[in-house]
Amino acid sequence: LLKYFNLPKSTYMYWQKRINRPNKDMEIENKILKIRKENPNYGYRRITAMLKRLGLKINKKKVQRLVQNLKLQVKSFSRKSRKYSSYKGQVGKVADNKIKRNFKVEKPYTQITTDTTEFKYFEKDKSGTYQIKKLYLNPYLDMYNSEIQNNQL
């Protein structure tokens, strides 16, 4: 049989000894299955924390490997779905695009652009509590030489 499959005898003996070896992680795997049955959205990090609360001293890499071997890896987690966006759709009137990406200007003061930047800061009120205040900066930029001509707070 070994000659037919072209396998060395040492490989055969190695695997022969391994087949009858008991699974030393069976207890941990059962606990992982129990935790996962109660909490189907738990990944290996939360499962590790739960196992540590149960009194097991175990490395997160081992838990991750066991979870992968048991085919229990969570696939529903997505960072994109958790990203915050304050965009509420089109609010107000959109100005006409008169510049049309033509940023090279022949004369000064013919194209002046602006942008509003919001800064948040804390200010102490009369009662001693800090209130969040907002400050808006509007710089006016001349497209001729890219100098800020004026600004408004």
Image (cartoon, rainbow, N blue to C red):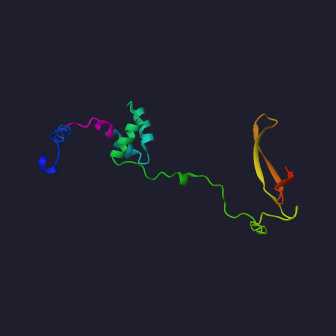
Task: Measuring from the top left, give residue 38's x and y in whole percent.
Answer: 39, 45
In the image, residue 81 above or below residue 59: below
Q: Is 33 part of what is drawn in magenta?
A: no
Tally of numbered tags: 0
Please indicate whether residue 151 sits to the left or right of residue 6 in the image.
right
Residue drawn at 42 percent across, 49 percent down: 74
Residue drawn at 43 percent across, 44 percent down: 43
The foreground one among 129 and 29 is 29
Prevalent SS, magenta region:
loop
In the image, residue 17 above or below residue 117: above
Question: In which quarter of the view is residue 25 placed?
Answer: top left
Task: Measuring from the top left, give residue 83's x and y in whole percent.
Answer: 58, 52
Q: Is 26 part of what is drawn in magenta?
A: yes
The foreground one among 58 and 46 is 58
In the image, residue 109 above or below residue 120: below
The foreground one among 85 and 95 is 95
Task: Measuring from the top left, give residue 77's x and y in whole percent.
Answer: 48, 51
The residues colored magenta run: 20-29
Residue drawn at 32 percent across, 40 percent down: 29
Question: In which quarter of the view is residue 9 placed?
Answer: top left
Question: In which quarter of the view is residue 64 placed?
Answer: top left
Task: Measuring from the top left, give residue 100's x and y in whole percent.
Answer: 75, 68
Please indicate whether residue 95 sits to the left or right of residue 109 in the image.
left
Please indicate whether residue 53 sits to the left or right of residue 114 in the image.
left
